């Protein structure tokens, strides 16, 4: 159990601007990780191993990308009980992201809206931080999530992904190709037929070279949006299989606002996460599972705020889950709650 009840920490943090609270918390985790002070957020680890995409996941709950964009807090976040932690999105060059304010809480809906725009310190700083972490030595899995710089024209997006893939490859248990952030202009266009075919063709060809060079084949996952219709999901599923991608992460944040209309901040531009994205994410997972068959790895993410929500994701077709917004609303105890719920679900 952690020393400080999360409800208390949360009431303090929620008095700050959302991004300020985020930076404050990350700075504290970075400072205290790998020290006894990590007891402020450390949780019991629930062992529930499962093999997926050739990797042994130590349990079925992971941290979703975007919380630790610069990979500063891998060990601290790992102490919260995650079996796998995904950091990034990292872009080849450092970039500031969009003007502030760019992150908003919608507490009535247990949701966030963000338009951060891949603010990050770039690939070199990211890899330097990844190298410092001990997390992987304990059998936990580290996912490195890659994207493109805002200044790179969309026609040249593949170049950015190739640079990022080559940089992160030796340090990753898996690599996530993120083409589903709504906050980088035209990024989601990469989900469409020809663009996706070209991108995945180039990335999987480079992966063959990297596998030969490093003597290790690192699984690659594609992260997709919830705002896709059945036909689009079908094309994505076929393209994933055509190129031998190893899994799919569903989903990123949504542009839809139906579930939060009328609430303060509901009309802010950006991606909506948390409870209101849950059903849209589950819908995409169900479509993917039907299109991809029973074996293809699906990582389910979007709106997990309880063990029950995670069980629903598995029932929709996910093999393992990730969360982000739930951690903000429920605190680190949610990780153990979800891991235990999934462990018990399997035992039944
Ligand atoms: C503030 C914030 C920043 C995010 N940044 C990224 C990112 O950089 N890359 C990415 O793939 N997903 C990013 N996401 C999406 C999350 O990883 C996740 O897919 C989404 O929020 C749905 O899960 P949740 O409801 O558990 O938060 C971000 C989400 C939030 C709330």
Image (spheres, rainbow, N blue to C red):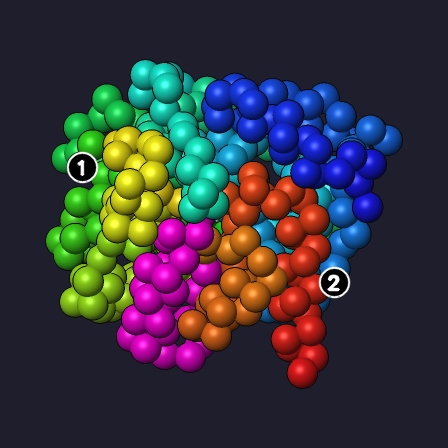
What residue do we see at 44% from left, 72% from top?
Answer: 317
Q: Residues within 10 Å of mark 1 (few under 14, many from 20)?
A: some
Whether label 2 touches label 1, CB < 8 Å: no
Give, as a single range, the part of the protein colored magenta: 274-300
Q: Would residue 227 be found to the left or right of residue 94 on screen?
A: left
Residue 255: x and y, percent? 26, 44
Q: Is residue 201 above or below residue 286?
A: above
How many marks do you count on the picture?
2
Looking at the image, can residue 132 be seen? no
Residue 329 got which mark? none
Q: Quadrant of the C terminus?
A: bottom right
Residue 47 got which mark? 2
Q: Main secondary structure of the magenta part?
A: helix
Front in this rendered view, residue 92 or 104: 104
Front in this rendered view, residue 234 or 347: 347
Quick one: SS at disc 2?
A: loop
Q: Which residue is mark 1?
A: 186
Looking at the image, can residue 187 be seen? yes
Which corner quadrant of the image does residue 244 belong to? bottom left
Residue 38: x and y, percent? 79, 33
Q: Residues within 10 Å of mark 2 (few under 14, many from 20)?
A: some
Quick one: SS at disc 1?
A: loop
Front in this rendered view, residue 191 or 106: 106
Which corner quadrant of the image does residue 37 belong to? top right
- Within 8 Å: ligand 1 and the Cβ of disc 2? no
Front in this rendered view, residue 264 or 147: 264
Which corner quadrant of the image does residue 288 belong to? bottom left
Q: Would residue 184 be found to the left or right of residue 108 on screen?
A: left
Q: Would residue 90 be found to the left or right of residue 138 on screen?
A: left
How far, Cα to Cα, is label 2 from label 1?
40 Å
Residue 275: x and y, percent? 44, 52
């Amino acid at each position: 159990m952690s020393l400080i009840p999360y409800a208390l920490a949360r009431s303090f943090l929620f008095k700050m601007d959302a991004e300020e609270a985020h930076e404050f918390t990350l700075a504290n985790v970075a400072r205290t990780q790998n020290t006894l002070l990590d007891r402020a957020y450390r949780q019991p680890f629930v062992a529930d191993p499962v093999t997926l995409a050739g990797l042994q996941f130590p349990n079925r709950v992971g941290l979703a990308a975007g919380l630790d964009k610069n990979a500063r807090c891998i060990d601290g976040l790992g102490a919260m009980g995650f079996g796998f932690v995904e950091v990034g999105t990292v872009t080849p060059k450092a970039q500031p992201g969009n003007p502030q304010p760019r992150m908003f809480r919608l507490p009535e809906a247990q949701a966030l809206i963000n338009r951060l725009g891949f603010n990050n310190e770039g690939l070199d700083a990211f890899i330097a931080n990844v190298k410092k972490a001990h997390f992987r030595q304990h059998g936990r899995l580290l996912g490195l999530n890659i994207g493109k710089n805002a200044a790179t024209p969309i026609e040249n997006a593949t170049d950015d992904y190739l640079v990022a893939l080559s940089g992160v490859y030796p340090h990753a248990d898996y690599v996530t190709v993120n083409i589903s952030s709504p906050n980088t202009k035209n990024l989601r266009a990469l989900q469409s037929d020809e663009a996706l075919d070209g991108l995945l063709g180039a990335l999987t060809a480079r992966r063959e070279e990297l596998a030969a060079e490093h003597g290790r084949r690192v699984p690659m996952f594609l992260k997709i949006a919830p705002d896709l219709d059945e036909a689009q999901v079908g094309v994505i599923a076929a393209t994933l299989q055509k190129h031998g991608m190893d899994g799919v992460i569903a989903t990123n944040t949504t542009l839809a606002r139906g579930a939060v209309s009328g609430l303060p901040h509901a009309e802010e531009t950006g991606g909506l996460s948390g409870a209101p994205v849950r059903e849209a994410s589950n819908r995409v997972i169900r479509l993917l599972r039907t299109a991809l068959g029973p074996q293809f790895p699906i990582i389910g993410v979007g709106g997990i705020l309880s063990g029950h929500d995670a069980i629903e994701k598995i029932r929709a077709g996910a093999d393992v889950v990730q969360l982000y917004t739930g951690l903000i609303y429920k605190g680190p105890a949610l990780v153990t709650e979800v891991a235990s719920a999934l462990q018990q679900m399997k035992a039944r």
